[in-house]
Image: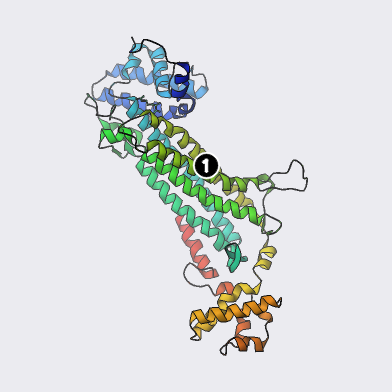
Amino acid sequence: MSRFAEPQDPVFRELNTSLGFDRRLWREDLDQSRAHATMLAARGIIAEGERDELLRGLDAVAAELEGGTFPFAPDDEDVHMAVERRLTELVGAVGGKLHTARSRNDQVATDVALWTRGAVDRALGHLRDLQHALVDAAERHLDWPLPGYTHLQRAQPVYLSHHLLAYFWMLERDRTRLEAVRAATEVLPLGAGALAGTNFDIDRRMVAEQLGFSTVAPNSIDAVANRDFVVDFISAAATCATHLSRLGAEVVLWASSEFGFLVLPDAWSSGSSIMPQKKNPDAAELLRAKAPRIAGHLTALLGVQHALPLTYNKDLQEDKEHLFDAADTLELVLQAATGMVAGARFDRERMAAAASDDLIAATDVADHLVKLGVPFRECHGVVAGLVRTAVESGRGLGDLRDDELRAAHPKLEPADVRGLLVQSSWLESKASEGGTALARVREQLEQARALL
Ligand code: ARG
């Protein structure tokens, strides 16, 4: 019998079905059902023989899904109903006992929590690979100077190792966020029933333990309405992808003829359909462009949950496509970033040439005067005047004459100033903790290695 006198409108059916995307949850759904059946028998809610039949049937369903022979039916609204229908076909009426003390509401929340946990673990693995690649690249280019930029104008020179490690630390924060998401996926919704709990004496702790949850959701209403862990995952993914977009943007710039700081490996480049000379950094460009896509999923899912009355509403079915695409995209960009970082060939000369323009040491000259007791603001003005004189006459700071230096400030000894303008001294003077001096970068590298 059915509650309904007429069949569903085909358009409604198309709108309502989630099978096209939620079939990706089948492993989690089967794991959950095995744990649920085992618990039902342990509590005497079903017989042990019935449990065995159910487990046998679930194995058969798993084999079909694994082998691609599972017969999906046009009436299967979602993966949960498809599995139960097929199970009943395979084992008979006892299949109908699996859904005892369970609703699709707590079932789907549990599957999604399990799936999100797996996605977190995969992302963490790729993230670690990228961190390794960054640390290795930093070690290979420990003392290679290049300009550090603000406003994309040459600001102060840094070592490439230092610059690469900046990304390591961004990713380390991403890792912390993902670990927190993982913890949020370890609270078991199952046992909440439709929303109010169940009429059976179930053992939620037992199910939690079997499925790797550390605790059970304390409130059944919250349990079926909650998708915070999905929001948290997509948020962490969006932040991580945004970090990679900055890396991608730098790779695009650095691979240009204008910069020429690096050459990408052929395996991470593509050609042009019309210009034979072109070698395009498409992968790096896509690192830039994929980040807002994940941010869009975050915005969309927050929108889905905005002002949503408790508890389950069909709106929540929309969590999955945002989750899946965010997870897939994050995995892709993490792996692509790793490939490019590991394979990029940096050009020591090009970078050094860009960092050898001695205007980049203007701060060092100002700080020299500060150390002689001149207030920093005044020093800034003095050196700004020197820079202007140099630039207007097409010279560097080191080319200024003694009288020009002395005229700028009586405490400015030409010999001292020229001593400051010796190439690598600009880097080695940045010896404060976290600075670019080699000793400090080595400290950073050690910290990074220890974390890995
Ligand atoms: N396909 C649904 C989803 O993904 C499953 C839950 C259905 N629950 C319900 N009460 N209709 O959200």
* Depicted 274 relative to depicted 248: above or below: above
Residue 373 locus on image (x, y percent): 48, 86
Q: Is residue 266 left or right of residue 37?
A: right
Residue at point 49% right, 41% down?
A: 296
Residue ID at (51%, 56%): 168
Q: Say which residue label 1 marks.
A: 293
Residue 34 visible in rendering: no
Residue 220, by quadrant, is top left
The answer to which of 357 and 99 lies nearer the viewer is 357
x 55%, y 79%: residue: 381
Q: Quadrant of residue 414?
A: bottom right
Q: Quadrant of the N terminus?
A: top left
Q: Is residue 415 left or right of residue 169?
A: right
Instruction: Give the camera-side residue of 222 and 146.
Output: 222
Residue 445 visible in this rendered orientation of the protein: yes
Dot 1, crowdedness within 10 Å: few (<14), some or many (≥20)? some
Residue 247 lies, in percent from the top left, at 57, 53
Find residue 359 and report its horizontal and vertical position in percent.
63, 74
Mark 1 falls on what kind of element? Answer: helix
374 relative to 430, above or below: below
Percent x, y of residue 214: 31, 40
The CB of the residue at mark 1 lies under 8 Å from ligand 1: no
Query: Of 289 and 261, which appears nearest the observer?
Result: 289
Q: How is the image coloured?
A: rainbow
Image quarter for ligand 1: top left
- Seen in the picture, residue 327 relative to 359 is either above or below; the reply is above
Amino acid type at image mark 1 = Arg
Displayed quadrant of residue 85: top left
